[in-house]
Structure formats: structure tokens, C-alpha cells
Amino acid sequence: MTIKEAQAAVDEWIKTYGVRYFNELTNMALLTEEVGELARIIARTYGEQSFKESDKNRDLGDEMADILWVLICLANQTGVDLTDAFAKNMEKKTQRDRERHWNNEKLK
């Protein structure tokens, strides 16, 4: 599925099952909540924190997909074409950081 197809699929789902989009502020709060859930799993899987019983059945991919879902909702309701925005962002990073990371002694 392309990003454009994902944006269309989320929009169709919202219109079919979700009644309407939550407002932008609510979706921003939900995005923050979902990022926190991902951070919790990362901290327990790769960091020093131990798993609590409620964390043990969490799926890393599912948490990332939750973030993507809400981000796509925000893009749709604010008129952002994520395919175009991502392509421009990649070009910006390539121009800005073309040699920066190769020259970073900390990465060698």
C-alpha cells in the first residue's frame, strides 16, 4: 500500500465507521498518547525498564501502526499530501545532511 492509498483508506474508514474525524487538537493529543505507548514498549524492550504484566502482550508494529493511523488522520484533515511532503522532506535531508553524518566522529 502506498502512502496515498493509506490516506484514502483511512479517509474511507472514517467516513464508513468513524462518523467523522476527531478535531485536530484531539488527534494531536491522541498522537502524543500513541507515541508514549510506543516509547513505553521501546524502553522495556531495548532499555533498562522491566516489563509490567500489562505491557507483555504489546506489539511493537501495532503501536507504530497506531501512530501512523493518527498521523494520516491529521494529514487528511489538514490537507497534507504525505507522499509529496515525504518526498520533499527526503530531498531536504539529503541536501542538508549529505556529508554531515559521514563526518560525524561519533558515528564511526
Image (spheres, helix red, strand yellow):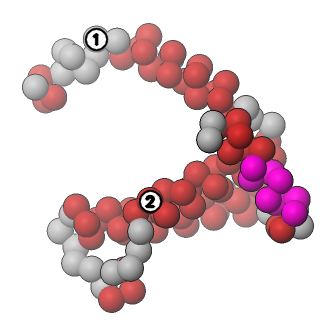
Q: Residue at x 80, y 37 (%)?
A: 79
Which quarter of the picture shows residue 52? bottom left
54 inside magenta stretch: no
User: In the rendered structure, are the residues bearing label 1 and label 2 in contact, judged by CB atoms less than 8 Å apart?
Assistant: no
Q: Residue at x 25, y 21 (%)?
A: 101
Q: Residue at x 48, y 57 (%)?
A: 64
Q: How many marks?
A: 2
Above or below residue 92? Residue 57 is below
At mark 1, the secondary structure is loop
Query: Is residue 74 visible from the viewing direction of this image?
Result: no
Q: Residue at label 1?
A: 99
Q: Earlier in the sequence, mark 1 or mark 2?
A: 2
Q: Residue at label 2?
A: 61
Residue 24 point in image, percent of width and height: 76, 54
Which quarter of the picture shows residue 4? top right
Q: Residue at x 46, y 68 (%)?
A: 37
Q: Nearer the viewer, residue 77 or 106?
A: 77
14 inside magenta stretch: yes
Residue 16 point in image, percent of width and height: 87, 63
Which quarter of the picture shows residue 15? bottom right
Q: Around disc 2, counting alpha carbons within 10 Å, would you say few (fewer than 14), some (14 to 19), or many (20 or more)?
A: few
Which residue type carries mark 2?
Answer: Gly
